[in-house]
């Protein structure tokens, strides 16, 4: 289970980095409103639940994968 957590955490960090690059225009990249699209599949199903409850937004998209990472960490340590 350690490898699943490590891969997921790596993908999460890469997606956060791509969000920052697209949002702030780092490295000469144009600002892109779709730069956070890679966070959405990593945060399933929590971002869908938050949207149904009316908590949709950029903070939900960023925090939802952290819930999945916590679940994987718990399964690894258990």
Image (tube, rainbow, N blue to C red):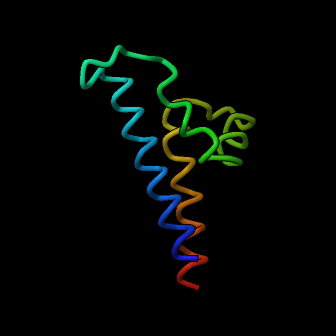
The residue that appears at 56% across and 57% down in the rendered structure is 67
In the image, taking residue 67 as reference, residue 6 lies left or right, namely left
In the image, taking residue 53 as reference, residue 36 lies left or right, namely left
Kindly give the residue lying farthest to the bottom in the view shown. Answer: 78
Locate residue 38, reporting x and y percent.
54, 37
In terms of depth relative to the viewer, which is nearer, 37 or 48?
Answer: 37
Kindly give the residue lying farthest to the top in the view shown. Answer: 30
Residue 77 versus residue 62 in the image, above or below:
below
Locate residue 56, reporting x and y percent.
62, 31
In the image, taking residue 52 as reference, residue 13 lies left or right, namely left
Residue 43 versus residue 67 in the image, above or below:
above
In terms of depth relative to the viewer, which is nearer, 25 or 67?
Answer: 25
The residue that appears at 62% across and 35% down in the rendered structure is 55
Q: Quadrant of the C terminus?
A: bottom right
Residue 11 versus residue 75 in the image, above or below:
above
In terms of depth relative to the viewer, which is nearer, 56 or 62?
Answer: 62
Locate residue 1, reporting x and y percent.
58, 76
In the image, taking residue 60 as reference, residue 9 lies left or right, namely left
Residue 50 versus residue 33 in the image, above or below:
below
The residue that appears at 43% across and 17% down in the rendered structure is 32
The residue that appears at 56% across and 75% down in the rendered structure is 74
């Amino acid at each position: 289970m350690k490898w699943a957590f490590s891969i997921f955490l790596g993908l999460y960090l890469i997606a956060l980095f791509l969000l920052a690059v697209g949002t702030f225009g780092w490295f000469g990249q144009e600002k892109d409103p779709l730069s956070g699209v890679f966070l959405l599949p990593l945060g399933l199903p929590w971002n869908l639940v938050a949207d149904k409850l009316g908590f949709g937004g950029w903070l939900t998209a960023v925090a939802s994968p952290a819930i999945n990472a916590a679940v994987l960490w718990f399964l690894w340590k258990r």
